[in-house]
Image (tube, helix red, strand yellow):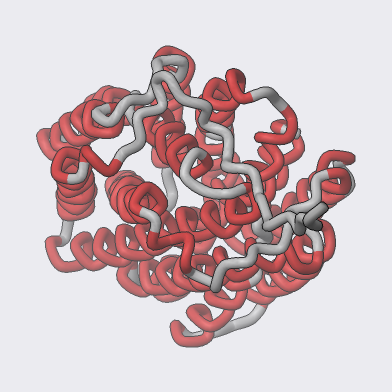
Amino acid sequence: MIAAQLTARFPNGMASLAILLHVEQQTGSYGAAGLVLAATSVGQAVAGPVTSRWMGVWGMRRVITLTLSVCVVAVIALALLPLNVPGYMALGMLAGLSTPPIQSAARTIYPKLVNSSQLTPLFSLDASLQEIIWIIAPVVITLVSTQVGTVQGLLLVAIILVGGGAWFILSPEVGRVRIPRSRNAFGKVVLKPPVMLATVIGFLLIGACAAVEVGVVATFDHGSLAAGLVLAVFSVGSLAGGLAFGHIPIGPWAMARRFVIITIGLSLTMVSLDAFWLGGTLILAGIGIAPALAVLFAITTASVKFSETAEAFGWAGTGQLIGAAAGSAIGGFLVDATGGARGAYLAAALFAAVGLIVSVVFVRSFPDLRHRDPSPYPDTEPVAVTPS
């Protein structure tokens, strides 16, 4: 299950860089490329909770197959059609709106695959292993886009979407697990404090990562493989952090401690744009990324009913995607405005600092999972009793 969903989500680590490189090459503007990335992320953010909830109505396989088909067509059109910036933005938004809800599906399935004592370690393992995507994918897409062509880079994204998506759809677990139809109104689950916190903090965390991505590409220019290598190093730090600290029990202060590491690392990136300095500081910042994501997954699952898990993860994903949109757009415009990459790194550090502040101010709203079953609540309904 982990292998299938990681492969299906592998294009997530390629698409943003592929679009950034392609649009920047076509328009000559990082700001325009940031706008297209923002449109794509907004499309994903809008669709996330909706398509995740659809899985409880029509089933996971039907929803993922439909969205996957539309997304592949949109990515191919982005690669092949000569467009202006509004045209790129429209297709980017369509690709975002049709992004398959594989992450929500996988994390809804996990509680049905293991017992409650294994669930938090499984989330930590998943958050750590997903960094393989961010280690390998940036290098692959940078190599293809810079050495072969940005059109070929986008076409590679489409090919892997088809192959990985098909593997996930055909996985037996996807057919066996049935998500009950939620009885609550759409959007009600996000009002629960832990889900709201996961959404807001996900926005800030991924916003910081997106700004780093823009900064790294701007630092080394679109013709250098160094950009992909430095981003891979960022993910190596996250992988190491997840494997080293993912087993630690999750208490109310867990998120704040992780954000301290991230904020310090990202703040140090502005000292020097040397490749080795950036690599070292991003490894430090990355150590907190996967453990922070594991906290987000765990508090979301532990706070909702099973029928609400897919939609809850959809909203959490929406927060992350809006963060990606904001981080990409702000980072891109600051690169253009300041004439250098430090503006994007400043944006990343500020996103992380606000995440730290939120984690401290709202610490009482984080559930204490150190001695508690992190599985979702079972769905119950009234039982008719016939008087004797």
Vertical arrangement, residue 25 with respect to residue 176, above or below: below
- Whether residue 282 can be seen here: no
Vertical arrangement, residue 28 with respect to residue 308, above or below: below
Instruction: Specify the quadrant of the image occupied by residue 259.
Output: top left
Vertical arrangement, residue 9 with respect to residue 54, above or below: above
Give the percent coordinates (x, y) of residue 19: 51, 63
* Horizontal arrangement in the rendering, residue 47 relative to residue 34 (left or right): right
- Residues 297 and 133: in front is 297
- Residues 9 and 211: in front is 9
Instruction: Specify the quadrant of the image occupied by residue 332.
Output: bottom left
The residue lying at 59 percent from left, 40 percent from top is 140
Give the percent coordinates (x, y) of residue 203: 34, 55
- Residues 372 and 330: in front is 372
Give the percent coordinates (x, y) of residue 247: 46, 15
The residue lying at 42 percent from left, 43 percent from top is 224
- Whether residue 70 can be seen here: yes
The residue lying at 70 percent from left, 60 percent from top is 155
Give the percent coordinates (x, y) of residue 38: 40, 69
> Where is the N terminus found, in terms of image quarters?
top right
The residue lying at 57 percent from left, 67 percent from top is 184
Count numbered badges in the picture.
0
Farthest front residue?
388
* Horizontal arrangement in the rendering, residue 316 relative to residue 98 (left or right): left
* Horizontal arrangement in the rendering, residue 28 relative to residue 271 (left or right): right
